[in-house]
Each structure stands twice: as C-alpha cells, then as structure tokens.
Image: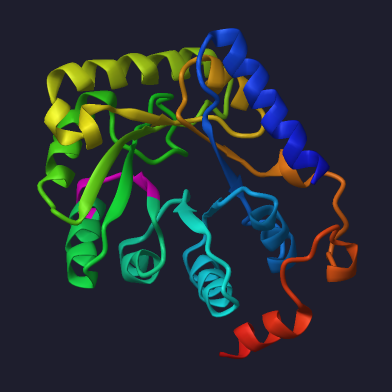
Amino acid sequence: MRNLDAVRGMLNEAASAAGRRAPNLVAVTKAVDDDIAAWVLDAGCRDLGENRADAFARRAERFASAGLEARWHFIGHLQRNKVRRVLEHVHVLHSVDSERLADAVARVAEELGRQIDVFIQVNLTGEDEKHGFGGDEAAAAALRLAESPAISVRGLMAMGPLRSHRTAREVFEEARELARSLEDEVPEAFHQRRCELSMGMSGDAALATELGSDLVRVGSALFVDLPHPATLDQAPQPPLTTDALKRAEDD
C-alpha cells in the first residue's frame, strides 16, 4: 500500500533525525470501510484505531468473525454508557479523560476479566473543545487507574491545538516534560515505570516523532486518493472475500 509505505518512511526519517526509534503507527480507520481497513491489516499494520463506540464494536465483531486479528485502539471521547461496549473488544484505550470515566473503565474491565492498556488524556492547550485532565491532575489520575489489576497505565495522550494561541511544538514539548516528571514522581503508576506518549496525527506526526511520541495516530495521510466507496477488486492483495464480510455482518 503506497500511502502506508510513505507514512512509515516519514516516521522513520523523523525518528532517524532525532536519534531515536520510530514510534508505533496506529492506523485510524474510522473513515474507511471494512475492506480498506482489512488491507491495512494485511499490509502488516496490526494496530487499528477507531473513535465511535458503536461503529467500532460492530467492526471489531465483524473482523473477529472473519478471522482478522487486529490490535484495536479506541482514540475518541468515550461516554460512560458505552464503556462496556468498547471494552469488550479494545486493547488500548487512549482517551480516559475524567475521574468518573476512569472509575467506570476500571470497574468494567474487572467485570469482563480483561486487561486493558490505558492512556490518560491530558488537555494541555486550554481549549474548551478538548476533553482531558489538566497537567497537574495527571499524577492522581494515573495512581487512581493503577489501583485496578485490570488496568495497565501506559502513559499520556495529548493533541495539538485547534487554534493558534499555542503551537503543536509547545504542546508536545510540554507533554514530554510532563511524562518525564511523572516518571520521577509516581513511577509505580506506569507499566514498567515508564510514561509513554500517544501524540501526533497526520498533520503533525513527524513533529511528534521528533519530540518523543511512542505512538502516532494517523488516518487521512494513509487514505488520501483511495477510491470511495472501495471495492475488493481494487485491492492489490485482498485479505478478505466479499462473502466472508457479508457472513460476518450477518452473524
């Protein structure tokens, strides 16, 4: 897949310039159909990201029925009444953004008997449009989540600004410094005592890589110029047949 190769090349180049390993790529498949998401998986990108609870759960169920094994990331705002629906399938939750949601996630994960990797969403831009803990609340949130045996706290998720009062570089640098301070302050809260970073999307993934992100969440850059709606006969190496997808949808 040409776009996937280009994105990987961009991340490798940015990482090499910064003297570090490339971050893990999460392909955000929320805007494409099942066939294209399956192509990405078949091309070797196992980590797929979604941001709408019901649509994600239906896709995860169809993929499981078709024998497709993705590592699912949920990256959108999660309402508490959708927690069980998402946690039945998700492996990594990037958007724990409040104490009430943290408590619900821990409780439901324990009830389901699942181990969930979690990132704490922090709002470092000060924008009302964004959810998340303040930087000064992150340590308490990490400790609160770490109390649950079903939760592995991986680190922080941060997004760049929507408006121009702060730059993405300023936000990502602040997130990096916050992560390092949390490792010093509450190392016991984090998986292997390291606070990872989930930051960077299509427009700022290279910058996030330079500034130390461990995961980048890329969608539009992967799917530009692809046909919509897609059909299986356009796939270079279709991993799934139309009949198989139909059977999965009917299950």
* Residue 17, image x, y percentages: 61, 9
* Residue 160, image x, y percentages: 52, 26
Q: Residue reaching furthest left?
A: 147
Say which residue appears at 36% left-offset and 60% top-offset.
79
Relative to 157, 150 lies left or right? left
Q: Which residues are magenta?
A: 93-100
The C terminus is located in which quarter? bottom right
Above or below residue 171? Residue 225 is below
- Residue 30 visible, this angle: yes
Q: Quadrant of residue 238?
A: bottom right
* Residue 18, image x, y percentages: 55, 9
* Residue 37, image x, y percentages: 67, 59
Q: Quadrant of residue 87?
A: bottom left
- Residue 167 visible, this angle: no
Say which residue appears at 39% left-offset and 56% top-offset.
91
97 falls in the magenta region: yes
